[in-house]
Amino acid sequence: MEDIDLKKLFSAPGRIEIGGNHTDHQLGRVLAAAVDLVTKCTAEANGTDIVHITDDRFSDAEVDLRSLEVNEEEKGISKALIRGVAAWFQKHGYAIGGFDAHVSSDIPAGSGLSSSAAFEVMIGKVFKGLFDAEISPIEIAIAGQFAENVYFGKPSGMMDQVASSFGGLSMIDFQDPLLPVITPIHAGFSGYTICVVSTGGSHADLTQDYATVRNEMKIVAAYFDKEYLREVSPDQFYTEIGRLRPLGDRAVLRAFHFFEENKRVLKQADALEKGRIPEFFDLVIESGRSSMDYLQNIYNLSHPQQQGLTLALALSEKLLSGQGAWRVHGGGFAGTILAFVPNSLREIYNKQMCEVFGEGCCLLLNIQ
């Protein structure tokens, strides 16, 4: 029988994005929550410099920690995330070492619940727990983002990693990206079910779409000699819109979305804290419409016939109009939507979505 006495259990949750669509990479605010789906592992130090991972769903991985340079052949696979987190730990003076781990997860891959961030945070917790690294939750999140951006090759903000590392429901302000302000939100959704609906689209070929959103926002910021939109005065932006048009109308609209969405997160947090749930739902719907009309991340322009997100949002509006809320979830272009569904309509909503997008498409979630 396998001896598990030396093994330790580590886990990290998936997350939902409730507000702040594509604001984190511009040092904006987000509203996010960890959910009750997790990636977990049992792990023990093996006294070597080699990380051995077996995984219930994906290929096993072996990473030699004596080489922590970016490996182009590993981009897009879990080895890159392990090596990237280890590299960040070592660069910042935290202990690392080889370990053996068995990984399992109930976060569906490609579900928009950020299984990758959960994996990164879990790996950070393994290094912390096995090698006594005195590292904070925010540093673990930073290490995860670094691994995803530099080693895995996916440009992203840090919302996913922070939400997974801290847990709960929080407003996160990234004005200082190395020291984000995390404000826990005390709110419940009694009488409603949180649903994430997978429309069947893959995120695999969307890296360029995500990068373009980020780049176009930064082009507008650069007009004002700033690196990020958060550093630009909203009043100055609105005054200059006419002169910004040569940068491209879509870039201007995406900046417009950022400024309004960044303010909207504050209103959402306030409504939740004060128990004004109908007002909060109106703001969620408003956020979704801004993403559709201004951010324009609802479908991939290379495949205009494939509009699963648009269809799911249209169905949600028809089924839930006047009750609950709905909006695009996460990066967009394909993937998932988020809905707050009255419990009285849960069975009808789930049935309708499954008829259109396939059995099991609707994940019913709780905030961790």
Image: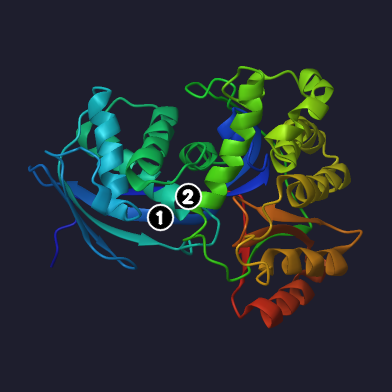
127 on left or right of 38:
left
- Front position in the image: 41 or 356: 356
Q: CA distance from mark 2 to mark 1?
A: 6 Å
- Report x, y in % for residue 305: 68, 72
Q: Earlier in the sequence, mark 2 or mark 1?
A: 2
Circle 2/circle 1 CB separation < 8 Å:
yes
- Report x, y in % for residue 15: 55, 49
- Report x, y in % for residue 35: 56, 51
- Front position in the image: 225 or 354: 225
Other residues around mark 1 within 10 Å, as few (<14) / some (14–19) / many (≥20): many
Q: Which mark is residue 198?
A: none
- Report x, y in % for residue 334: 60, 62
Amino acid at the residue labelled 1:
Thr
Residue furthest left in the image: 48
The quadrant in which the N terminus is found is bottom left
| Figure quadrant of residue 276 | top right
241 on left or right of 207:
right
| Figure quadrant of residue 225 | top right
Amino acid at the residue labelled 2:
Pro
Q: Is residue 137 visible?
A: yes
What residue is shown at x 77% (from left), y 23% (from top)? Answer: 237
- Front position in the image: 84 or 304: 304
Give the answer, above or below, for where 338 lies relative to 10.
below
21 on left or right of 245:
left
Q: Which mark is residue 13?
A: 2
Q: Which mark is residue 39?
A: 1
Residue furthest right in the image: 322
What residue is shown at x 7% (from left), y 43% (from top)? Answer: 48
SS for dot 2: strand
Residue furthest front in the image: 246
SS for dot 1: strand
Q: Is residue 269 visible?
A: no
